[in-house]
Each structure stands twice: as C-alpha cells, then as structure tokens.
Image (tube, rainbow, N blue to C red):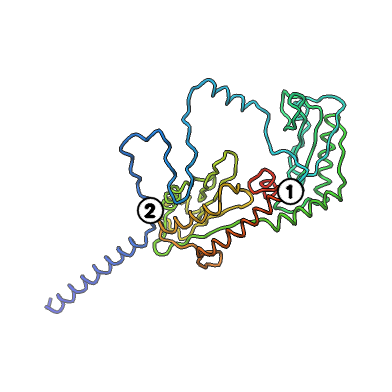
Amino acid sequence: MSTLQISLAVVGGLVLAGVVAHSAWSSRKNLPKRATPEAAPAQEPAAEPPQAPGPGLDALAERQEPSFDVDSDLSALSQLTAPERKPGLDILIDAVAPVALESVVSGEAALAAMPATRRAGSKPFAVEGLSVLTGEWEFPSAGHRYSAFQCGVQLANRTGALNQIEYSEFVMKTQAFADAVGGEPEFPEMLDEVARARELDQFASAHDAQLSFTLRAIHTAWSPGYVQQSAARLGFVAGSIPGRMVLPATQTGHAPILGLAFDSQAAMAEDPEQTALRELTLSLDVPQVLRSEQPFERMCEAAIALAASMDGVIIDDNGQLIRPEAMEGIHADLEQLYDTLDGRDLSAGSVLGRRLFS
C-alpha cells in the first residue's frame, strides 16, 4: 500500500470518527430536559409546615398525619352517616316545583321514588326534602322524615338554556316522583321559565371567561418528568388525567385554581423521559374559582416562573408573545367581570356561579 493510500485511509478514518462524534453530540443535545433527583433533607423536617415555593404563591394547607384519636374517629363516622349535602335549589337559576304532602314521608320512600337519572335533557334535576327534624331542605336520606318536597331543574348551563322539551321531561320526572310519595306538585308556567332560562343563558354567555397561556420551549424540549417537577415546585399536583396537573384551592371542596396540561400520550409513553414536549398550557376557568384566590395573578406568576426556569416563552393562541402590559389589561377586564357577577349574586367560585358555568 502506497503512502498516498495510507494517508487517504487515515483521513477517511478521522472524518468518519468526526461524523460519529458529531452525531452523538447532536443526539445528546436534542434529548429533552429531564427531571433531576431531589436532594433529601439532611435533618428532620421542622414542625412548622414549609412555605410553597414560587413568587407570590400562598403556602398549601398543612397536611395532617393520620391518628387514632377517638374524637376524630367519631367525627369522621358522623360525616359518613350524615345526609348527603349537595348545592341547594335556588330560584335564581332553577325552575322549582313544590310538592305538597298529606302526611310525613320517610327518607327510604323518597329514595325509592327517585328517577333513574338526575338530568332533564342536558340540565341537572334535583329533589329536596324538608326535614321534620331540622326544618331545613336537604337531599333525602334514609332514617329521616320529610313534611314536603321540592323538585327543580337548572335553567341554564354551558350547554345552553332550558328548552321546552327539557322542561316537559322535568314535569314528567317530578310528577312520577310526586305520585310515588303521595304528593301533589305545583309547576311554574313553562313559557315563563323558558324565557327566564334564555335571559340567564344570554347573561352567562356574555360573562363567561376561560383563559389560557401557552408555554413554548425556546431551545431544548422538555420531558414529562421535567415539566411535572418544575410545576410541582410551584404547588401543582397531579390531576386525575394523564398529562394534567392542578393548583389546588386553599378551601376544601372548591375547584382547582389553575390547570396545567401537556400531551397525554407523552405522559403515558413507555419511556416518558425520552419523549419530547415543546409546549404546555396553563388554564383558568374564571367563574369556577373564588375571586379571593387571586387566580389570574397566580396564573401570571406561575407562567413567568415556569418560563424562566424552563427556558420558555409565554404565547397566546395565535403564537404571539404575551407581554406583561397585556397581562395587566386582561387583569383590569377581569375585575369588571368579577364586579358584574357579584352584582348578579353569581360570584365567581360561589355555589351558584359554579353550577351556572358548568
């Protein structure tokens, strides 16, 4: 083999090695960012609950350890055996039909008379009994007795206004229940209730607000684990659906303050850490969250913090960057919306507000 051939072979080997090295470097560079192992604390955690990280975010409620305290056990047992508590019927957003009784009816009889489904078309249908023991309206419960009942159907929700067909179904369900318990219903005028439903639906449609920010990776993509770890540092917890996290409300029984979502298929992949995500969405369902939670401020703070820590940008549905001044404008509009809902007794996050905007 000549010197030229040897030289060409060496050069070719060096070029091939360079190509392989560059390919390996490129592959490593393009891997999504992964979650990093969290360092374990060196000492016992303090008795005082730690503050939730993140700018402007309130601390999560202190988690209570299980115990064998007798009073606590009795309290838990009483909660399990108490009548079911559901949002009560309200003439503001429900068509209500009183059901007069000739004699007291047991809770067992009322439960047996309940319709198979608690909806009239797309609208929630409910029955309440006037408890002989407490004198309050409640969902019928075994072991209780009732001197009267009332049936109701919601006038509007996000599917639209109650129509005549749905009202007729409400009448049939109410009449069947009244016959079964030996009662006599009194129905409001259908045309009046349908007109009320349309007016309420028009108001709700004009004052509904569901906001979202999209976070997009600037350079390196993210793995699902990296997203979850970054969001958890701001107080988000895993939701019931793969690829969804929520920021819990500070009050028990209320809807989450914020939602965070990314590709559910990526979350369910066999090796999620090898899956690349380039976008995630922060969302706020305004009428479902109490104004006192300051949900939009926390949404902006979470978006800014995530964008900074994950090397991303905040964009709208059209792919345009969202500037801080734009956030301030949205905030001002929301304050007016809150005032309008408060003036209609349908405050954001209230029982009636959550029912109407559902």
Q: Is residue 25 left or right of residue 329?
A: left
Look at the image and tell me in which quarter the N terminus lies: bottom left
- Give the alpha-carbon distance from disc 1 to disc 2, as whole Å: 44 Å
Q: Residue at x 45, y 61 (%)?
A: 278
The local crowd at label 2, few if under 14, some if 14 to 19, many if 20 or more residues have their Cα within 10 Å, is some
Q: Earlier in the sequence, mark 1 or mark 2?
A: 2
The residue carrying mark 1 is 122
Q: Describe the element under mark 1 as helix, strand or loop.
A: loop
Quadrant of the image occupied by residue 160? bottom right
Q: What residue is drawn where x is 80% and y is 44%?
A: 95
The answer to which of 356 and 17 lies nearer the viewer is: 356
Nearer the observer, 3 or 170? 170
The percent position of residue 176, horizontal first and vertical second, equals 83, 36
Residue type for callout 1: Ser
Q: Is residue 20 above or below residue 72?
A: below
- Taking depth in this image into account, of 304 and 194 the one nearest to the observer is 304
Residue farthest along the top direction in this orientation: 70
Question: Callout 1 environment at 10 Å: few (<14), some (14 to 19), or many (20+)?
Answer: some
Which amino acid, by three-letter code, is at mark 2?
Answer: Arg
Q: Residue at x 78, y 32 (%)?
A: 113
Q: Is residue 234 shown left or right of residue 212?
A: left
Contact, mark 1 vs mark 2 (Cβ under 8 Å): no
Residue marked by disc 2: 34
In the image, what residue occupies the spot 61% across and 57% down?
334
